[in-house]
Every structure is written in structure tokens, then in C-alpha cells.
Image (tube, rainbow, N blue to C red):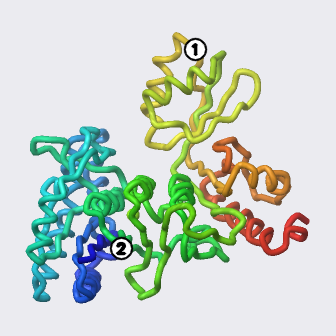
Amino acid sequence: MELVVQKYGGTSLQTAERMAQAADRIIKETKKGRQVVVVVSAMGSTTDDLTALAGQVTTRPAARELDLLLSTGEQVSCALMAMALQARGIEADALTGSQAGLETDATYGSSIVKSVDPLPIRQRLEEGKVVVVSGFQGCPGGHEVTTLGRGGSDTTAAVLAAALKAARCEIFTDVDGVYTADPGTIKGAQKYEEMDFESLSALAELGASVVHPRAAEAAKSGHIPLVVRSSFTEQEGTTVLPANARTYAFPVIGVTYETGLSHLSIHGSMDMKKLEEEWKETLNPWKAVQHTGGCQYRIIIRDEDVYDTRSFLTRFRGKLACRVSEHATGRALVHVVFKSGEEKQNAEAFLQQLPLPSGVIVQSQPHVWSIDVAENHRVDVCQVLHDYCMKRETDPVSAAN
Ligand code: ASP
Ligand code: MG
């Protein structure tokens, strides 16, 4: 019997009505003779609301208790979805991440799934049940609760699909597939019917929020086709397959933006290589670094890492004689993601001449051309770059002029 994992995101479960629509879709799948495992996110903005609530109680909530709090969002969806299915005459069991056999490491707030015991789900499937699993959470042992980081329900779905050797993993969301840019803000964004995992990972890691990067990795290493589609339409969506599945026609994989970034200017004599090495061991990697002249560097990091980075640099000061001279929030990076470093080199000279509203070009990865802009300019900059890249495909000469 074919087994399918379906994941429903927060917007697809925002209200009881949407929950019912998702339940009907799940039932349709079972009627085709398939076993279905459903992974659910928290309803609507529940995770943001719970985070804000914690913030009203304390400015620095303990990671362990925050995980306990946030994991409840997915459990609400999970229990309600099982009830919705039962109300329609379908046998269904709701499981927390721990009950579903997801073992994680003990990093609260961004834990990694270490293993999955497929038995609790398998047994229920064999009894003819639909199994509904709370996304975004697991257990590092005992009765502890961990979460997998924002957007982590995608990872739950992909990891379960791999462990259960599913025929495919379907991610139901509010867009109908993976596009060359965010279709909600960028005109002319093109949808992929098929793409490969490398391309999806490249986009996901650089801010395309359509699928969590760890989910792309898990599906890839488990050889599970991943389908990204809308829960509001019957449209086909994007199917993500291994590299040699099919090549696509677009000149770039896509143009993305990352928001919620900060500048940290550091000043002093330092060995940047050594700094980066120690940095990687202690902190989330920096997004980019610019040499701004003399002994001055500007490092771009995520807003939430500013506090830890400052204390890291203070500790580092003795060794490297550097000091933080400035900190600015409200930054964004716009990335043009190429298929290869060579493609990037071919386009670089043209990109530099484009009339962009603002921004400083920064080095990030060999196949990515990135520009640092104020957050409120990100859409305009992304639009100019995307227009250029798409035009270049059809008419390289006029695109260059
Ligand atoms: N509810 C969590 C979040 O909002 C996990 C998820 O939706 O995947 O980040
Ligand atoms: Mg998501």
C-alpha cells in the first residue's frame, strides 16, 4: 500500500473551516487506497502569539520552558485534526512528536532529529488509521520536549517520510509551488513544475521561506520526492526530485531576500580567518562580511544573534584587539542564486551596473551574488534583479543594455 506524508502549514489550518477543508483533502487521499500520515503546524499565528506572550512575562525566557510553551501550538492542531477526521468517520490517532518516536538532540529551540522509531506510526497505519503528528517537536530523552526551530514542521514531515519510506512528502502551504522569487511581492516570478534538491536547498537557505532547508536536506538524503503545493487549490505544485531529474530553463535558480538582519561594525587588528573559525564554533555563522577600509569590518548577522555576538566579541577582545563600534538593525540581503559559480561570473559585470535603488555588494557564496540593503528597499531591489535575470534569459543583448 502506498504511503504518503502530508504536511499542513499554519495558514492552511488557520480556522476550524480550513481545518475541515484539510481533513476533506486527507480523506480523499485515503479513498485512493493510500496510507496517510499527516503532520500539522500550529494554527495561524499561534507560534508568534505564544512567543509574544513569553516576552510579556520575561525579556529572556529560558529555552527549555519556551520549547514547552511553543510545542503546545502544534498539539492543539494535531488533536483538532484527529477530531475532525473522526467526526467524518475516519479512524485517526493524534500523536505528539515524542509519541511519534522523534528523538532529537538536547538543543532547545533548534534541535536536530537524531532518529525516528517508526513503530508507533506503523502499528497505527496497519490498523487502518490515519496518523496525525504534531510538527516542530521531538524528545531528547526522558519526558523532555524540544522544538526544531521556526518552520520546523516541514522537517518533521520530511524526516518521517524518510523513516517510513513514503512514496512522497507533500507540503501544503499558501503558495502553489516554488517560484523564482516570492510570488506575493515580485512581479513576473516563475513557478517551477519540477526542480532538483540542490536548487531547492539553495533557495531555502537564502530566505525563500517556502520550505525549511533542513526538510529539503532530509527529503534529499532519504530519496523522497517532495511536493510543494497549495492547500487552497487543486493545482499540481512543484515536485522536487534528485539532481538529474530534469533541467529547467531559467538562467538563475531564483532571487531571494533575507530580512531581520543587523550590521555589526568591528574595528581593530585581527586575523579574520581565525575570528571566523572561532566564530563558527560558538555562534551561528555570519551572513556576510565586508571590509570597509583600514582595520574596519562590517559583519552581517541575524538580529537575534546580536546579543550573543557582542558577548563573544568582548571575550575575544583580548586575543584580537577588536571592538564593536556600531550596531544597526533593519537590514536585509537580496541574493541572486545562480546554478553555478561560473554563471555568476558571467553575469556579475552586468549586475553591478544595474540601477539599483540602494545597497552594497557583499561576498557570500561562490554561486550567489548578494547585496546588502535597508530592509524597506528589499522588494524594489529584488524586483530589479529578478526583471534583469528573467530578461537576460530571453534576450541577453538587450538585458545587458
Ligand atoms: N509553528 C512553528 C513556526 O511557526 C513551526 C512551523 O510552522 O513549521 O515556526
Ligand atoms: Mg513553514
Residue at 36% in and 54% down = 150
* Residue 164 can be seen, yes or no: yes
Along the line of sight, which residue is nearer the eye, 28 or 210?
Answer: 28
Task: Judge the density around disc 1: few (<14), some (14-19), many (≥20) Cα neighbours within 10 Å.
Answer: some
Residue drawn at point x = 57 percent, y = 74 percent: 192
Snapshot quadrant of residue 25: bottom left
Q: Determine which residue is flagged by label 2.
A: 11
Q: Quadrant of the N terminus?
A: bottom left
Q: Residue furthest top?
A: 318
From what the image shows, is residue 108 above or below residue 308?
A: below
Vertical arrangement, residue 14 with respect to residue 162, above or below: below
Residue 320, labelled with which disc?
1
Q: Where does residue 64 sit, x and y in percent of width and height?
A: 21, 41
Q: Is mark 2 within 8 Å of ligand 2?
A: no
* Residue 160, position as x, y percentages in the image: 27, 60
- Residue at the image point whose x is 69% and y is 72% from the top: 249
Q: Amino acid at mark 1?
A: Leu
Return the disc, 2 or 1, that comes first in the chain's sequence. 2
Instruction: Please name the amino acid that badge 2 sits on.
Output: Thr
Asked whether, in this view, residue 334 is left or right of residue 4, the answer is right
Q: Circle 2 sits in a helix, a strand or a loop, which is it?
A: helix
Nearer-the-camera pick, 236 or 322 = 236
Q: Secondary structure at mark 1?
A: helix
Whether residue 49 is visible: no
